[in-house]
Image: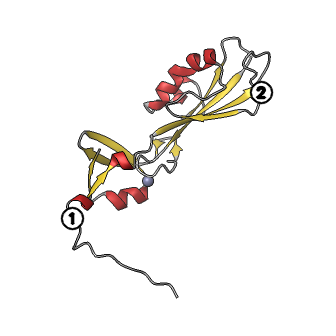
């Protein structure tokens, strides 16, 4: 036997009708970097090695390569289309290290700002719905379920 308790919204206070983003915030963009070709490397990178990160540099990655790939990471962070640089997918780019020894496959992962679930990317871009934070004002990229859960709420940082 399953009991379902349904809470009515009659007693909801003003506070409960506000979604506080600071308690839920998920970074919109993360990067998955995979080594797909290796060679003579002082950082000892090997094929198959993976790094996943957002704002903090991942431990063990070659610093020269991280600096070299940064313009790509930045472009992905602002939803740049890697096909403009010759990639076949808009969120994937291969980066060659300065010594031309190591190849890094960089994939941008786009996430719902509220729950962190991964958003799909297709030819038209990142598939998401939009909500608005009102204090301060900025747009949010969210998944379908967060959209329906929070579309009636006021959203503040
Ligand atoms: Zn979500």
Residue located 42% across and 59% down the image = 145
Q: Residue sitting at 76 percent across and 16 percent down? A: 41
Mark 2 residue CB less than 8 A from any atom of ligand 1: no
Q: Position of residue 92 (x, y in %)?
A: 59, 33
C-alpha separation, residue under disc 1 versus residue under disc 2: 56 Å
Q: Is residue 81 above or below residue 64?
A: below
**Residue 102: x percent and y percent?**
72, 20
In the rendered image, which quarter contains the C terminus? top left
Q: Position of residue 134 (x, y in %)?
A: 23, 45
Mark 2, residue position: 46
- At 24% from the left and 39% from the top, the residue drawn is 136
Would you say the beta carbon of the disc 1 residue lies within 8 angstroms of ligand 1?
A: no
Q: Is residue 63 above or below residue 106?
A: above
- Relative to 55, is 139 above or below? below
Q: Give SS at disc 2.
A: loop
Q: Quadrant of residue 93?
A: top right
Most extreme residue toward the bottom is: 1
Which residue in the protein does label 1 denote? 13
55 on left or right of 9: right
State the scheme by which the image is colored: secondary structure
Are the residues at dot 1 and dot 2 in contact (C-beta closer than 8 Å)? Answer: no
Q: Is residue 15 above or below residue 78?
A: below
Residue 133 disc label: none
Q: Quadrant of residue 146?
A: bottom left
């Amino acid at each position: 036997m399953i009991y379902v308790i349904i809470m009515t919204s009659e007693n909801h206070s003003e506070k409960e009708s506000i979604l506080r983003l600071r308690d839920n915030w998920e970074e919109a963009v993360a990067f998955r970097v995979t080594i797909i070709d290796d060679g003579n490397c002082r950082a000892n990178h090997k094929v198959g090695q993976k790094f996943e990160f957002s704002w903090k540099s991942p431990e063990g990655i070659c610093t020269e390569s991280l600096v070299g790939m940064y313009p790509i990471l930045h472009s992905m962070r602002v939803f740049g289309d890697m096909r403009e640089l010759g990639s076949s997918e808009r969120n994937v780019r291969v980066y060659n290290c300065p010594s031309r020894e190591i190849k890094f496959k960089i994939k941008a992962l786009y996430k719902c700002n509220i729950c962190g679930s991964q958003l799909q990317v297709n030819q038209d871009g990142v598939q998401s719905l939009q909500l608005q934070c009102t204090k301060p004002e900025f747009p949010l990229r969210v998944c379908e379920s967060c959209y329906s859960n929070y579309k009636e709420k006021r959203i503040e940082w």
